[in-house]
Image (cartoon, grey):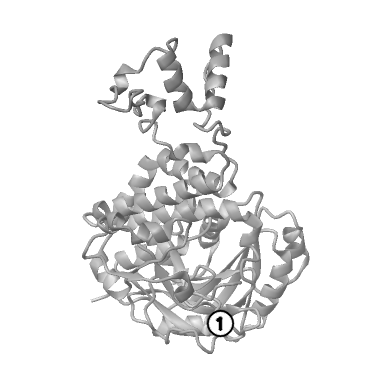
Amino acid sequence: MSTPQKPIAKISVAVLSWNGRRHLETCLAALAGQDDPGVDWEVLVLDNGSTDGTADWLRATVLPRVRLIASPVNLGFCAGNNRLVAEAAGDAVAFLNNDTRPRPGWLKALAAALAAAPPDVAAVSGQIVDWAGERLDFGRGAVTFDGHAFQLDFRRPLTVARVPAAGEELPFACGGNMLIRRASFLAAGGFDEDYFAYLEDVDLGWRLWSGGERIVFAPEAVVHHRSSATSDLLGLYNRGFLFERNAFLTAYKNYEAGLWERIMPALLLTLLSRTQTLLLDHNPGTATLRLDPYAGHIANTAPTPPEDGHGTPPSPVQLPPAWTWQGFKVRWRGYGPGDFLRRGARKLLGVAPAPLAADGAQPPSLTDERTIAQLRALSWLLGNLDRVADRRAAIQARRKRSDREIFARFPLYLVPTYPGDHALFASPGFQAWLPADLPLVSKSLEEIMEMRE
C-alpha cells in the first residue's frame, strides 16, 4: 500500500522568464485574478538573464504574492526551474510557462485534483489550448521508441481533439502546466539540467513512473498558450540539437536493463540515418560520400578488358605502370579526362592530391545548419558518456515499476519525423532490430497532429 501523503498546505507557482516581459504582463495579471485555490500560495518569477528590463519592471511593479529571483545569465528551462523549486516555500510546485494566460479556475482545479488523487499520484497535468481557446496544445502525450515525444492531437480543433478525462493517467505532465509534489520532484532528481530545454518533462515523467508514482490529468486546469513564443528565441537549428541529444538521453537513462541493450541498435540506426540523410541531401559536394572507393579505378578494381575483347581481364593488382601506353589508357578511362589532367599537373608540381570527386566535382562542404546540429548532438553524447552513465545507474537503482508495466499503459510510438525516417522505418533490416515484445504504435505525423500548410 502507498504511504498516505500529507495534505498540501502551500503551493508555489514557478514562472520562468527569458526576455519575456511582454508575456509576463499578461500572465501575472491572470495569476492575480485566480480563484481561491483553498490553500496558501505564492508566485516565484525567475528572470533568467533577460536583457529586456524584466527584473527592473518587476521590482518597480507591485504584484500580489509575486517574489522575484534574478539570475545574471540564462540558466535554461531545467536549471532555472530547479532553482525555483529550491527557493519555493510550498510543498507542491505549479510550473507555468510565462507565455500563457491561465483561466481564473486554473490553480484551484490543479490543487483540487492533487488533493483528491491517491497518494501514489506525484503530479497533475492541466490542459493547454491556443490563445483563442479553439485548438488543443496539450492534453496527452506520447513517447516514441527513441525518446522523442508528441503532444497528441496538437493544433486540432477542440471539437474533435480527444481531451483526457479527469484522473486519466498520462505518461508525462507538460512542463508548462503541471502541479507536482515538491518531495516527489526532488526525490526523482528534478529536471535534468543537461537538457537545458525540451523533453525534460518527458524524462521526469518516465522517472516518476519507474519510481512507482503516477501522473493524472485535470481537464479544468486550463491555460491559453502563445505556442513557441519563447522557444523561437532559441533558433530552429539550436532546437534541433536539443531535440536529438535530449531524446537519446531520455532513452538511454530510462530504459531498464535487458530492454535497453536490445533497443539500442535501432536507436543508433535512427540517429545515424537522420544525420547521414541531412549530410548527403543538404550539403554541397557530398555526392562523393556515396562512392565506394573499391568499386572502380580509384582502387584499381575495375580493370579494362584486353584489346581484343576476349580472355580473362587482368587482375586489379596487375594494373600497368602509369608510364606505359596501356597504363595511360586505363587511368584516362578510370579517372576521366578532367581528373586525370589535374592529377598529372599536381604530380609534376609536387602537390599532394586534392580530395576531388571522381567526376571532378567540388569536395564535400558542411554548410547546412541542421546537419551541424545533428553532429553537435553526437559530439556531446560521446563527450559525456561517463557522466550520463552515472545518472542512468541512479535512475535504475530507484526503479519500482518495470517498463513492461509502463508500456502496457502507454505503448511507445513509431513516427517517421525526420528526413530519411520513412525509408528507414520501412526497412526489414531496421525492423529486425526492434524487440518483438516491445509494444509499438505506428503512426504518421498527420495522424498525430494537425499539420500546418
Quadrant into which the N terminus falls: bottom left
User: As rendered, which of 412 and 210 lies closer to the eye?
Assistant: 412
Q: Please, what secondary structure does the residue beneath circle 1 have?
A: strand
Residue type pointed to by label 1: Val
Expressed as whole percent of the image width and height from the top left, the position of residue 382 reads 41, 40
Expressed as whole percent of the image width and height from the top left, the position of residue 97 reads 59, 69
x 70%, y 77%: residue: 29
- Position of 387 with respect to 43 (left or right) is left
x 45%, y 10%: residue: 323
Quadrant into which the C terminus falls: bottom right
Answer yes or no: is residue 160 visible.
yes
- Position of 437 with respect to 91 (left or right) is left
x 53%, y 29%: residue: 356
- Position of 438 with respect to 50 (left or right) is left
User: As rendered, which of 218 and 34 lies closer to the eye?
Assistant: 218
Give the answer, above or below, for where 337 lies relative to 361.
above
Expressed as whole percent of the image width and height from the top left, the position of residue 368 reads 58, 46
Residue 46, by quadrant, is: bottom right
- Residue, far bottom: 159
Answer yes or no: is residue 69 visible.
no
Residue 34, by quadrant, is: bottom right
